[in-house]
Image: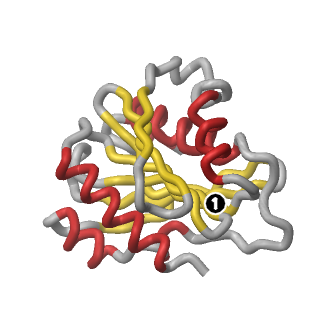
Amino acid sequence: MFHRFQNSRAWTGAIALGLTLIFTVTACSAGSSKIEACKLVSATAAGRILGTRVTVKAVDTAVAGSDVATICNYNTGSVHGGFMLIAGRIHYTDAAAEVAYQEKTATTDIPPSVGKPTFSFTDVKGLGEAAYLAKMRGSFQLHVLAHGTMIVISMLQDVSPKAVAQSKQLARIALGNIR
């Protein structure tokens, strides 16, 4: 599934990290419906934030036990301009404790074929119940827990104040569209 991207190894690592962190939680909320990642941020809204035309395409649905996450690619035509949005319902009782657990176990389940990237984590205040940036060379992800949901904005570019601000704007829109 990941071979369709121009820089497939980098996207594979980014997707693997996002899914690993979503699936390290105990279980999907009972009776909850799947969240369609592509419906959380419109192409128009994403384009306005990124400053360029964006096309939206559902990439996949990943399932681990009863956990379901959907993955959406927001493409700008450049490997370093768009982002992926991963969304799934999760169960947690303490968002801050969940973030700490995810940071501790970030690389546990990443497939050996992807390699074990080195991450650094930074807490992000004022977004959802808890949020953090997972940074690795050449990419970063913004992880947000809110409303029994985790969303991940994965950008294949180095961390910069502009890129982080964009990811926060995208996350706020996505959070506002979770039902």
User: Could you tell me which residue is drawn at 32 percent across and 74 percent down?
Assistant: 43
Which amino acid, by three-letter code, is at mark 1?
Gly
User: Could you tell me which residue is drawn at 45 percent across and 58 percent down?
Assistant: 85
Q: Is residue 23 above or below residue 170?
A: above
Q: How is the image coloured?
A: secondary structure
Q: Is residue 36 above or below residue 127?
A: below
Residue 107 placement (x, y as % from top left): 59, 26
In the picture, measured across the screen, residue 157 lies left or right of residue 151, that is left
Residue 146, located in which quarter of the rendered image?
Answer: bottom right
In the picture, measured across the screen, residue 9 lies left or right of residue 95, that is left
Q: Most extreme residue toward the left, as rendered?
A: 51
On the rendered image, what quadrant is the N terminus found in? top right
Q: Is residue 73 visible?
A: yes
Q: Is residue 178 above or below residue 50?
A: below
In the picture, measured across the screen, residue 27 lies left or right of residue 72, that is right
Give SS at disc 1: strand
User: Could you tell me which residue is drawn at 57 percent across and 71 percent down?
Assistant: 36
Number of marks in picture = 1
Query: In the rendered image, which residue does mark 1 sit on?
Result: 88
Residue closer to the observer: 131 or 116:
131
Residue 118 placement (x, y as % from top left): 44, 20
Q: Is residue 70 visible?
A: no
Residue 56 placement (x, y as % from top left): 37, 67
Residue 93, located in which quarter of the rendered image?
Answer: bottom right
Residue closer to the observer: 57 or 173:
173
Q: Is residue 30 above or below residue 10?
A: below
Residue 45 placement (x, y as % from top left): 29, 76
Number of residues whose C-alpha sits closer than 10 Å to that of mark 1, classed few (under 14), some (14–19) or many (20 or more)? many
User: Could you tell me which residue is drawn at 61 percent across and 81 percent down?
Assistant: 179
